[in-house]
Image (cartoon, rainbow, N blue to C red):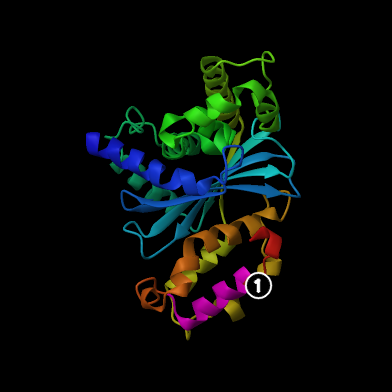
Amino acid sequence: MRSFISEKLDFVQKKARSAYSDITGKVTLISEVFNGLPIISSFESTESTNFDEKHYFIIPFKLSEYGIALHTMRSLPKGAAEINDLPKRRIFHFYNEHAEGQLKRYLLEQAESSVMQGQHDKISSIENLANSIDALDNKLTYGMLLVGGLSAIVNPILGATIAAKAILPSVTGLVNKHGLKPLGEKFTQSSLTSQIEQAKQKVQRDFESGNTLKLINPILHELDLALNTTEQQHDPLLDFDLSSSDIDELDSLIWRSLTIKALRHVYDEVLEDNSKHDNAQLGPEDLRWLEMLFASQDPEEQ
């Protein structure tokens, strides 16, 4: 247990400073291999959605001990604050009908940790699966995906407490930027900490009470097929038509760009390192396809 907690603290201390340009900024990307599973968390702004969404991409990844990578992604309409009254929903993107079981096995193996205690007998419904991942996600990022830069202000692990004290006289404008409505014009460190903790809990409750969807993502399904076939058997660049792929449960095509962005976060370093291609089961046809997908993104979305 002590070792598990120590790993989490080391993880946050290493990644928090690189995730923020300054204490008022948003987290953009946190990435680490955690207990054998690559876990990536990111914050994205999108044009064509009226929801505050949490996406869970279960991505085929042969370099992982579990054969998958987990990418969690908070997606908000452009200009929306992290703390808001938008309708919430959580969306699981699986690559086939067996991927959910793979993810559950990983979480069950973490059941002895402080994050998962009391959850090991509850990972049956998709809602409980989401809650379990959120618990791990929030521990790893200290709630940064819930309230953005406000987490850094009050968390001593992130080394921002001194900075927070320095800006307390003018903190009202900062908390307004992140969507937190102050109870008064003046803050103490303890009152600010209390309000931010309450805001985290509210955002999480809102997600838990919203809809939770699970679906087979066509791009992830194609990646799984590509990794398990040869070029002679299947060429994703020739045999897969992204333009005709759709997900009936979602009312916009934003899922395509979010999926490609998640794949880029997982595979970018692998594509650049030729020595990893064989172990990642990436043939020349797979490399061409991934490079085409990444090139298809608008530069602003990368």
Residue extending farthest to the front is 166
Residues 285 and 200: in front is 200
Q: What residue lies at 56% left-to-right and 24% top-to-bottom?
A: 196
Residue carrying label 1: 241
Using the rendered image of the protein, determine whether residue 174 is visible from the camera's viewpoint. Answer: yes
Q: How many marks?
A: 1
Residue 301, quarter of picture: bottom right
Residue type at the position of mark 1? Asp
Write down the region rendered in magenta.
Answer: 282-294
Q: Quadrant of the C terminus?
A: bottom right
Q: What residue lies at 72% left-to-right and 38% top-to-bottom?
A: 80
- Label 1: state its secondary structure: loop
Q: Quadrant of the N terminus?
A: top left
Q: What residue lies at 42% left-to-right and 39% top-to-bottom?
A: 140
Confirm whether the magenta stretch covers residue 289.
Answer: yes
Q: What residue lies at 31% left-to-right and 40% top-to-bottom?
A: 110
Q: Is residue 289 above or below residue 64?
A: below
Q: Main secondary structure of the magenta part?
A: helix
Q: Is residue 297 above or below residue 84?
A: below
Measuring from the top left, give residue 138's x and y in whole percent: 46, 35
Query: Would residue 102 be found to the left or right of residue 233 on screen?
Result: left
Query: Would residue 262 be found to the left or right of residue 60 on screen?
Result: right
Using the rendered image of the protein, determine whether residue 1 is visible from the camera's viewpoint. Answer: no
Measuring from the top left, give residue 290's x and y in whole percent: 55, 72
Residue 150, quarter of picture: top right
Measuring from the top left, give residue 234's x and y in whole percent: 51, 80
